[in-house]
Amino acid sequence: MAMMEMRHVEPFEDATPLLSEPKVLREKAEADGLLFFQGLLDPVKVNALRAQILQLCDLHGWVEEGTSIGKGIANGEAMVCESRDPRWIAFYNDLQRVRDFHALALDDAIIGALEVLFGESVLPHPRNICRVVFPDTATHSTPPHQDNLYIGGSEQTWTVWIPAGDCPVSLGGLAAAKGTRKLGRLEDVEGQGAGGRQVLIDDDSTWVGGDYACGDAIFLHSLTVHQGCDNVSGDRLRL
Protein backbone atom coordinates (compact mmCIF):
# COMPACT_ATOMS: atom_id res chain seq x y z
CA MET A 1 0.00 0.00 0.00
CA ALA A 2 1.13 3.56 -0.74
CA MET A 3 -1.04 5.18 1.93
CA MET A 4 0.47 5.54 5.42
CA GLU A 5 -1.63 4.22 8.29
CA MET A 6 -3.21 7.07 10.26
CA ARG A 7 -3.57 6.26 13.96
CA HIS A 8 -4.88 9.67 15.00
CA VAL A 9 -7.33 11.49 12.72
CA GLU A 10 -9.08 14.72 13.68
CA PRO A 11 -12.16 16.04 11.84
CA PHE A 12 -11.93 19.13 9.67
CA GLU A 13 -12.25 22.50 11.39
CA ASP A 14 -13.89 25.10 9.16
CA ALA A 15 -11.67 28.17 8.82
CA THR A 16 -14.27 30.21 6.92
CA PRO A 17 -15.17 32.45 9.91
CA LEU A 18 -11.49 33.41 10.18
CA LEU A 19 -11.49 35.09 6.77
CA SER A 20 -12.80 38.16 8.59
CA GLU A 21 -10.02 37.83 11.18
CA PRO A 22 -6.79 37.80 9.15
CA LYS A 23 -4.46 37.76 12.15
CA VAL A 24 -6.16 34.72 13.67
CA LEU A 25 -6.29 33.00 10.26
CA ARG A 26 -2.54 33.46 9.79
CA GLU A 27 -1.82 32.18 13.29
CA LYS A 28 -3.82 29.03 12.56
CA ALA A 29 -2.10 28.60 9.21
CA GLU A 30 1.29 28.98 10.89
CA ALA A 31 0.45 26.43 13.59
CA ASP A 32 -1.34 23.79 11.50
CA GLY A 33 0.08 24.28 8.01
CA LEU A 34 -3.41 23.75 6.58
CA LEU A 35 -6.77 25.50 6.31
CA PHE A 36 -10.08 23.82 5.52
CA PHE A 37 -12.89 25.89 4.03
CA GLN A 38 -16.37 24.40 3.99
CA GLY A 39 -18.43 25.39 0.96
CA LEU A 40 -15.83 27.84 -0.32
CA LEU A 41 -16.71 27.20 -3.95
CA ASP A 42 -20.00 27.22 -5.83
CA PRO A 43 -21.00 23.53 -6.03
CA VAL A 44 -22.83 24.16 -9.30
CA LYS A 45 -19.56 25.30 -10.87
CA VAL A 46 -17.59 22.38 -9.40
CA ASN A 47 -20.18 19.81 -10.49
CA ALA A 48 -20.18 21.30 -14.00
CA LEU A 49 -16.44 20.64 -14.16
CA ARG A 50 -16.98 17.17 -12.73
CA ALA A 51 -19.40 16.42 -15.56
CA GLN A 52 -16.80 17.47 -18.14
CA ILE A 53 -14.13 15.28 -16.57
CA LEU A 54 -16.48 12.30 -16.44
CA GLN A 55 -17.38 12.85 -20.10
CA LEU A 56 -13.68 12.48 -20.89
CA CYS A 57 -13.45 9.40 -18.66
CA ASP A 58 -16.33 7.90 -20.62
CA LEU A 59 -14.74 8.85 -23.93
CA HIS A 60 -11.62 6.93 -22.89
CA GLY A 61 -13.61 3.88 -21.79
CA TRP A 62 -13.19 4.35 -18.03
CA VAL A 63 -16.91 4.50 -17.18
CA GLU A 64 -18.88 1.25 -16.95
CA GLU A 65 -20.96 0.81 -20.09
CA GLY A 66 -24.70 1.14 -19.56
CA THR A 67 -24.43 3.25 -16.39
CA SER A 68 -25.15 6.93 -15.89
CA ILE A 69 -21.96 8.85 -16.63
CA GLY A 70 -22.70 11.26 -13.79
CA LYS A 71 -22.46 8.47 -11.21
CA GLY A 72 -18.84 7.85 -12.14
CA ILE A 73 -19.07 4.05 -12.03
CA ALA A 74 -15.67 2.68 -13.01
CA ASN A 75 -15.13 0.23 -15.83
CA GLY A 76 -13.62 -2.66 -13.87
CA GLU A 77 -11.71 -3.85 -16.92
CA ALA A 78 -9.91 -0.52 -17.43
CA MET A 79 -8.11 0.18 -14.12
CA VAL A 80 -5.86 2.95 -15.43
CA CYS A 81 -3.49 4.52 -12.91
CA GLU A 82 -1.59 7.78 -13.14
CA SER A 83 1.68 6.82 -14.81
CA ARG A 84 3.42 6.78 -18.16
CA ASP A 85 0.68 4.45 -19.36
CA PRO A 86 -0.30 5.72 -22.85
CA ARG A 87 -3.97 5.50 -21.81
CA TRP A 88 -3.39 7.90 -18.92
CA ILE A 89 -1.34 10.28 -21.05
CA ALA A 90 -4.02 10.38 -23.77
CA PHE A 91 -6.69 11.19 -21.18
CA TYR A 92 -4.56 13.83 -19.51
CA ASN A 93 -3.74 15.55 -22.77
CA ASP A 94 -7.47 15.89 -23.43
CA LEU A 95 -8.07 17.15 -19.90
CA GLN A 96 -5.52 19.92 -20.29
CA ARG A 97 -7.72 21.37 -23.04
CA VAL A 98 -10.68 21.81 -20.67
CA ARG A 99 -10.90 25.53 -19.99
CA ASP A 100 -13.00 25.20 -16.83
CA PHE A 101 -10.37 22.93 -15.27
CA HIS A 102 -7.81 25.73 -15.35
CA ALA A 103 -10.35 28.46 -14.61
CA LEU A 104 -11.30 26.88 -11.29
CA ALA A 105 -7.82 27.58 -9.92
CA LEU A 106 -8.45 31.28 -10.54
CA ASP A 107 -11.84 31.35 -8.83
CA ASP A 108 -12.42 34.58 -6.90
CA ALA A 109 -13.13 32.63 -3.70
CA ILE A 110 -9.76 30.86 -3.85
CA ILE A 111 -7.77 33.96 -4.76
CA GLY A 112 -9.62 36.01 -2.14
CA ALA A 113 -8.88 33.52 0.64
CA LEU A 114 -5.21 33.41 -0.32
CA GLU A 115 -5.00 37.20 -0.36
CA VAL A 116 -6.34 37.25 3.20
CA LEU A 117 -3.78 34.61 4.16
CA PHE A 118 -0.85 36.45 2.59
CA GLY A 119 -2.07 39.96 3.24
CA GLU A 120 -1.23 40.96 -0.32
CA SER A 121 -1.84 40.07 -3.96
CA VAL A 122 -0.97 36.51 -4.94
CA LEU A 123 0.48 34.92 -8.07
CA PRO A 124 -1.32 31.69 -9.02
CA HIS A 125 1.02 28.88 -10.05
CA PRO A 126 0.08 27.61 -13.55
CA ARG A 127 0.50 23.91 -12.75
CA ASN A 128 -2.97 22.47 -12.19
CA ILE A 129 -3.17 18.74 -11.45
CA CYS A 130 -6.08 16.35 -11.79
CA ARG A 131 -6.15 12.90 -10.25
CA VAL A 132 -8.59 10.19 -11.27
CA VAL A 133 -8.44 7.25 -8.87
CA PHE A 134 -10.01 3.91 -9.70
CA PRO A 135 -11.40 1.75 -6.88
CA ASP A 136 -9.25 -1.00 -5.37
CA THR A 137 -5.95 0.50 -6.51
CA ALA A 138 -4.37 0.97 -3.08
CA THR A 139 -0.80 0.61 -4.32
CA HIS A 140 -1.37 3.66 -6.52
CA SER A 141 -2.77 6.04 -3.88
CA THR A 142 -0.69 9.21 -3.54
CA PRO A 143 1.87 8.52 -0.76
CA PRO A 144 2.69 10.99 2.04
CA HIS A 145 4.70 13.85 0.54
CA GLN A 146 5.44 17.58 0.63
CA ASP A 147 4.48 19.64 -2.41
CA ASN A 148 7.69 21.66 -2.25
CA LEU A 149 9.54 18.64 -3.66
CA TYR A 150 7.59 18.93 -6.91
CA ILE A 151 6.91 22.67 -7.08
CA GLY A 152 10.22 24.04 -5.80
CA GLY A 153 10.68 27.77 -5.29
CA SER A 154 9.48 29.51 -2.16
CA GLU A 155 8.48 27.36 0.79
CA GLN A 156 5.68 29.88 1.36
CA THR A 157 3.77 28.46 -1.58
CA TRP A 158 0.32 27.08 -0.75
CA THR A 159 -1.64 24.56 -2.79
CA VAL A 160 -5.39 23.95 -2.87
CA TRP A 161 -6.98 20.51 -3.09
CA ILE A 162 -10.56 20.42 -4.36
CA PRO A 163 -12.77 17.34 -4.69
CA ALA A 164 -14.69 17.34 -7.97
CA GLY A 165 -18.00 16.52 -6.32
CA ASP A 166 -18.92 14.97 -2.98
CA CYS A 167 -16.07 12.83 -1.66
CA PRO A 168 -16.87 10.64 1.35
CA VAL A 169 -14.03 8.86 3.15
CA SER A 170 -14.79 5.63 1.29
CA LEU A 171 -14.02 7.32 -2.01
CA GLY A 172 -10.52 8.25 -0.86
CA GLY A 173 -10.06 11.97 -0.23
CA LEU A 174 -6.99 13.81 1.01
CA ALA A 175 -5.63 13.75 4.57
CA ALA A 176 -2.98 16.12 5.95
CA ALA A 177 -0.63 15.72 8.91
CA LYS A 178 -1.23 18.66 11.22
CA GLY A 179 1.77 20.82 12.10
CA THR A 180 4.25 18.95 9.90
CA ARG A 181 5.29 22.12 8.08
CA LYS A 182 7.37 22.85 11.19
CA LEU A 183 9.53 19.80 10.41
CA GLY A 184 11.02 21.67 7.46
CA ARG A 185 11.92 20.05 4.18
CA LEU A 186 12.10 16.29 4.79
CA GLU A 187 14.24 13.81 2.93
CA ASP A 188 12.25 12.05 0.25
CA VAL A 189 12.63 8.38 -0.60
CA GLU A 190 11.28 6.11 -3.30
CA GLY A 191 7.62 5.29 -2.79
CA GLN A 192 4.65 3.61 -4.42
CA GLY A 193 1.80 5.57 -5.92
CA ALA A 194 1.42 8.86 -7.77
CA GLY A 195 4.65 10.86 -7.87
CA GLY A 196 6.85 7.91 -6.98
CA ARG A 197 8.41 9.67 -3.97
CA GLN A 198 7.38 9.90 -0.33
CA VAL A 199 8.50 11.22 3.04
CA LEU A 200 8.51 9.39 6.35
CA ILE A 201 6.96 10.86 9.49
CA ASP A 202 6.18 9.61 12.98
CA ASP A 203 3.49 6.94 13.23
CA ASP A 204 1.82 8.93 16.00
CA SER A 205 1.38 12.06 13.87
CA THR A 206 -2.01 13.75 14.06
CA TRP A 207 -3.85 13.77 10.75
CA VAL A 208 -6.82 15.82 9.62
CA GLY A 209 -9.36 14.21 7.29
CA GLY A 210 -12.94 13.15 6.71
CA ASP A 211 -15.82 13.53 4.28
CA TYR A 212 -15.70 16.36 1.73
CA ALA A 213 -18.80 17.95 0.24
CA CYS A 214 -18.83 19.48 -3.21
CA GLY A 215 -17.51 23.04 -2.84
CA ASP A 216 -15.16 22.27 0.06
CA ALA A 217 -11.44 22.99 -0.29
CA ILE A 218 -8.33 22.38 1.79
CA PHE A 219 -5.32 24.71 1.58
CA LEU A 220 -1.85 23.29 2.31
CA HIS A 221 1.53 24.86 3.05
CA SER A 222 4.21 23.49 0.70
CA LEU A 223 5.91 21.64 3.58
CA THR A 224 2.75 20.13 5.07
CA VAL A 225 2.82 16.35 4.69
CA HIS A 226 -0.34 14.99 3.09
CA GLN A 227 -1.50 11.87 1.28
CA GLY A 228 -4.29 10.48 -0.84
CA CYS A 229 -6.52 7.97 0.93
CA ASP A 230 -7.42 4.64 -0.65
CA ASN A 231 -10.53 4.45 -2.80
CA VAL A 232 -12.47 1.62 -1.13
CA SER A 233 -15.84 2.54 -2.66
CA GLY A 234 -15.87 -0.68 -4.65
CA ASP A 235 -16.99 0.75 -7.98
CA ARG A 236 -16.66 4.54 -8.22
CA LEU A 237 -14.06 6.84 -9.73
CA ARG A 238 -12.65 9.47 -7.39
CA LEU A 239 -12.03 12.85 -9.04
Image: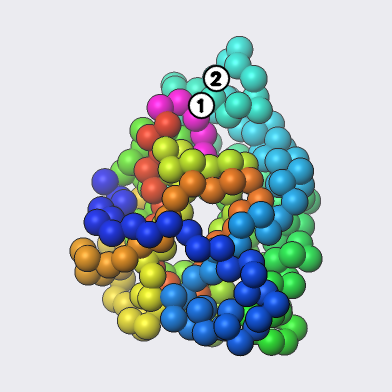
Q: Residue at x 74, y 72 (%)?
A: 112
Q: Are marks 1 and 2 in contact (CB under 8 Å)?
A: yes
Q: Is residue 197 left or right of residue 214?
A: left
Question: Of the residues shown, which amino acid type is indicated by label 2?
Answer: Glu
Q: Is residue 138 left or right of residue 33?
A: left
Q: Residue 13: x percent and y percent? A: 50, 63
Q: Residue at x 70, y 35 (%)?
A: 51
Element type at mark 2: loop
Q: Main secondary structure of the magenta part?
A: loop
Name the residue at the left extreme.
203
- Distance from the alpha carbon under mark 1 to that under mark 2: 5 Å
Element type at mark 1: loop
Give the residues in magenta: 234-238
Position of residue 235 relative to residue 229, above or below, is above
The reply to whether residue 114 is in sight is no
Question: Of the residues shown, which amino acid type is indicated by label 1?
Answer: Ala
Q: Residue at x 37, y 43 (%)?
A: 230
For label 1, the residue is: 74
In reply to whether residue 13 is colored magenta, the answer given is no
The reply to whether residue 53 is in sight is yes
Which residue is at the front of the view, 87 or 82? 82
Q: Is residue 118 left or right of residue 179?
A: right
